[in-house]
Image (cartoon, grey):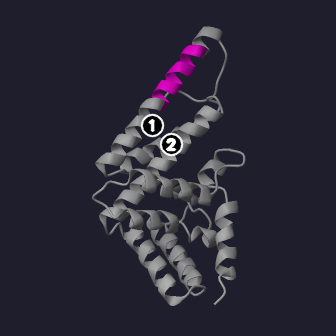
Amino acid sequence: MSLLPYLSILRNLKTTGRTGWLNHGIPHPESIADHMYRMAMICVSACPPALDQHRCIKIALVHDVAEAIVGDITPVDGISKEEKHRLEKDAFDHIARLLPHSSATDILALWNEYEAAATPEALFVKDVDKYELLLQTLEYEKQYGGFKDLGVFISARNAISTDIVKSWADEIIHLRLQFWSALNKEIAQDGSIIGGPLH
């Protein structure tokens, strides 16, 4: 069985920008693959010792694979969670048919584990997904010097459940508040106008 059809589909993950950033006017935003890669590296670098690190890495690398077919569906797209799950399940079923049975079974099991938040590993990776979003939010706001207010994404912090990722996320929130506070002081001093309020 040739891997080329499978790998050709995966290429879409490298070339598809994340929808949230596109919707907020970020030019050439991170791709879906960029997002998953940094999630995997977080799992490589900071997985709690009580968890199966290799499984966390694999879940991180697999969890958005269906987006190679269905795209990056966000909560503002008007698609219910149930419909999103169905579309992604259909995409995974299609992808699975392009793989040897054992590999297909493994990938589907990883995705189902993530979707159901069925294990501590899946819960951790779900939180890493939100943490990576928060980090990218701060990075884009800094990159654009406050002209991009991406505060809408900060609510992702509320959905994080594991203590270790909560602490990482709170560091991002603190750094973001420092960034906006310093920016507002600078504005007050020179009278310039900048987009984006202090959150």
- Residue 30 is covered by the magenta coloring: no
Q: Circle 1 is placed at which residue position? A: 172
Q: Quadrant of residue 33?
A: bottom right
Residue at left offset 32%, top offset 47%: 164
Point out the residue furthest to the top here. Answer: 189
Give, as a single range, the part of the protein colored magenta: 176-186
Dot 1: element: helix
What whole-number distance in Å separates the C-alpha atoms at marks 1 and 2? 6 Å
Query: Is residue 95 at all visible to an observer of this figure?
Result: yes
Badge number at residue 93: none
Q: Name the foreground residue: 129 vs 158.
A: 129
Question: Does the CB distance between marks 1 and 2 fall below 8 Å?
Answer: yes
Q: Nearer the viewer, residue 45 or 164?
A: 45
Q: Main secondary structure of the magenta part?
A: helix
Q: Is residue 43 above or below residue 112?
A: above
Mark 1 vs mark 2: which is more N-terminal?
Answer: 2
Q: Position of residue 18 (x, y in %)?
A: 62, 55
Side (left or right) of 124 relative to 5: left
Q: Quadrant of the N terminus?
A: bottom right
Based on the picture, tell me whether residue 178 belongs to the magenta stretch: yes
Q: Is residue 194 left or right of residue 175?
A: right
The residue type indicated by label 2 comes to: Leu
Per the image, the residue denoted by label 2 is: 135
